[in-house]
């Protein structure tokens, strides 16, 4: 077996923070290799990129997520007790709980709720000089997903809860104050969710069958037990928080409509068939999660290299979405490439790859795509707005990435 190419030198944690999304891809190019070994957070790590790497990484039951993320990132994202940290049968059974929520009818109800809240927001936005789109869409999504999930959200609380969810994903890629703020606010959200689960179980609150609150409150594990209230609260947050985070992709979609106005014209002319290619290209092109982490559950060999049990691997999601071996001119924004796309499960991996049911691929991918498509329709056909002068650059060393100005719009008015 050949030794895995080494990124020689001291611990690379600072380089990872400084280089952000480009950290793995840059080194893979330097070593002319799909993988290299380095040290991150004082531990040995193997970083990999490309669709072949994704295929091995998402092979069912090969990697666990336990011990694969820094504890603070883990706490702010999927957290202890969550589906992500389970393996084998226990994972599949819990994952099914999430997938139950993802029927086409349920997803279009969520998109309809978002559209209702969006239209109401346009009325308010029209009275303001400027609106930060990223913040506005987060609040719309927070209201919509709570309603969809059967979570009571009094109007007066919507802004506060939106801030809590926002702080969690803002803090996840950060070190320092951004991370601590996320931690502090997360404890509040957990208390809130735990209360809702307990009230549902005690019959003090009625929630419609099929909603996330109902499904999670009454889900039973492999031993037939209800989830403990803390774990149920964590799983509720795992539905609500990432749905609010879809605002980030909507902001990127708005940026794409601004930078490539021919697409806006196409959607205004009713080219709905291009909505899906457009949002797929937004998910491929713009930076969201940098990598996914896993630890090998047992030893295996791949491409002439040996991976011992317990090896910590980081798969480059952003780099795979920009791999020149997969994508022609990956740094060009070209939705057309998705008109004929074969749905390959390992090359477009902003939300992980492989199978949803048996692997760790994101449970909310269909929701994300549906919400983005509806948001693009809303941005192009139900409202008009100006995009004033601002700094729209995206700093690839900031995780999670966002245009510097967070996309400010002005002169908002309902369309024609
Ligand atoms: C905002 C856009 C989103 C992005 C970029 C995203 C990305 C991801 C990524 C990278 C993973 C981890 C894959 C891995 O461990 O290999 C993941 C897992 C997960 N996501 Fe998402 N996600 C998004 C939206 C959502 C939504 C809307 C939901 C739920 C409604 C959701 C629920 C989950 C769950 C439950 C997991 C854990 C899956 C498992 O371990 O089996 N995500 N997501």
Image (cartoon, helix red, strand yellow):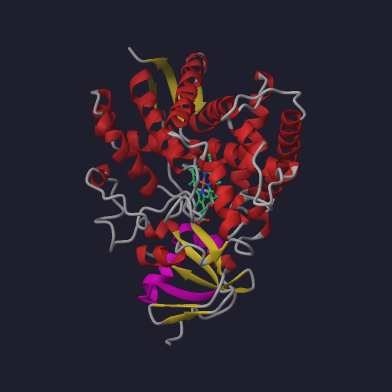
Q: How many labels does the image show?
A: 0
**Quarter of the image containing the N terminus?**
bottom left
Measured from the top left, where is residue 152 in percent x and y? 66, 24
Is 131 drawn above or below residue 372 in the view shown?
above
Query: To which quarter of the image does residue 302 belong?
Result: bottom left
**Quarter of the image containing the C terminus?**
top left
Residue 35 vs residue 391, the one in the foreground: 35
Position of residue 152 in the picture relative to residue 382 (left or right):
right
Position of residue 337 in the picture relative to residue 202 (left or right):
left
Residue 193 vs residue 217, the one in the foreground: 217
Dominant SS of magenta comes to: helix
Q: Residue at x 34, y 43 (%)?
A: 280
Query: To which quarter of the image does residue 175 belong?
Result: bottom right
Residue 58 vs residue 252, the one in the foreground: 58
Residue farthest bottom in this picture:
1
Q: Residue at x 34, y 34 (%)?
A: 258
Position of residue 260 in the picture relative to residue 397 (left or right):
left
Q: Does the magenta stretch include residue 248?
A: no
Report the magenta residues as a range. Answer: 16-38
Q: Which residue is drawn at 49% across and 52% down?
A: 289
Measured from the top left, where is residue 337 in percent x and y? 24, 47
Measured from the top left, where is residue 229 in percent x and y? 74, 41
């Amino acid at each position: 077996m050949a030794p895995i190419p080494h990124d020689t030198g001291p611990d690379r944690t600072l380089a990872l923070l400084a280089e952000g999304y480009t950290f793995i891809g840059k080194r893979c190019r330097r070593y002319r290799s799909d993988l290299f070994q380095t040290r991150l957070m004082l531990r040995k790590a193997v970083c990999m990129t490309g669709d072949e790497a994704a295929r091995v990484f998402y092979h069912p039951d090969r990697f666990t997520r336990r011990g694969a993320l820094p504890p603070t990132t883990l706490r702010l994202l999927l957290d202890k007790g969550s589906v992500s940290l389970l393996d084998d049968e226990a994972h599949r059974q819990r994952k099914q709980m999430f997938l139950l929520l993802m029927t086409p009818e349920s997803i279009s109800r969520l998109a309809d709720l978002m559209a209702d809240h969006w239209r109401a927001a346009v009325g308010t936005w029209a009275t303001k000089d400027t609106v930060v789109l990223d913040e506005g869409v987060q609040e719309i999504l927070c209201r919509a997903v709570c309603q969809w999930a059967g979570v009571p959200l009094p109007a007066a609380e919507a802004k506060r809860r939106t801030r809590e969810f926002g702080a969690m994903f803002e803090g996840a890629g950060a070190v320092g104050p951004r991370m601590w703020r996320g931690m502090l606010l997360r404890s509040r959200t957990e208390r809130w969710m735990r209360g809702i689960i307990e009230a549902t179980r005690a019959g003090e609150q009625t929630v419609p069958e099929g909603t996330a609150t109902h499904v999670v409150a009454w889900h039973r594990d492999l031993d037939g037990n209800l989830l403990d209230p803390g774990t149920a609260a964590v799983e509720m947050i795992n539905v609500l928080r990432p749905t609010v985070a879809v605002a980030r992709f909507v902001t990127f979609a708005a940026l794409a409509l601004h930078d490539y106005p021919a697409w806006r014209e196409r959607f205004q002319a009713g080219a709905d068939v291009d909505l899906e290619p457009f949002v797929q290209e937004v998910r491929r092109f713009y930076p969201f999660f940098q990598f996914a982490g896993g630890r090998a559950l047992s030893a295996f060999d791949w491409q002439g290299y040996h991976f011992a049990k317990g090896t910590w691997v980081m798969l480059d999601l952003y780099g795979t979405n920009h791999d020149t071996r997969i994508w022609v001119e990956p740094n060009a924004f070209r939705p057309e490439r998705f008109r004929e796309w074969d749905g390959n499960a390992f090359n477009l991996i902003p939300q992980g790859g492989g199978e949803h049911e048996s692997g760790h691929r994101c449970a909310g991918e269909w929701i994300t795509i549906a919400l983005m498509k509806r948001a693009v329709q809303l941005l192009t056909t139900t409202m008009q707005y100006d995009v004033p002068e601002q700094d729209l650059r995206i700093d690839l060393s900031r995780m999670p990435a966002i245009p510097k100005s967070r996309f400010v719009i002005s002169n908002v008015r309902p369309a024609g």
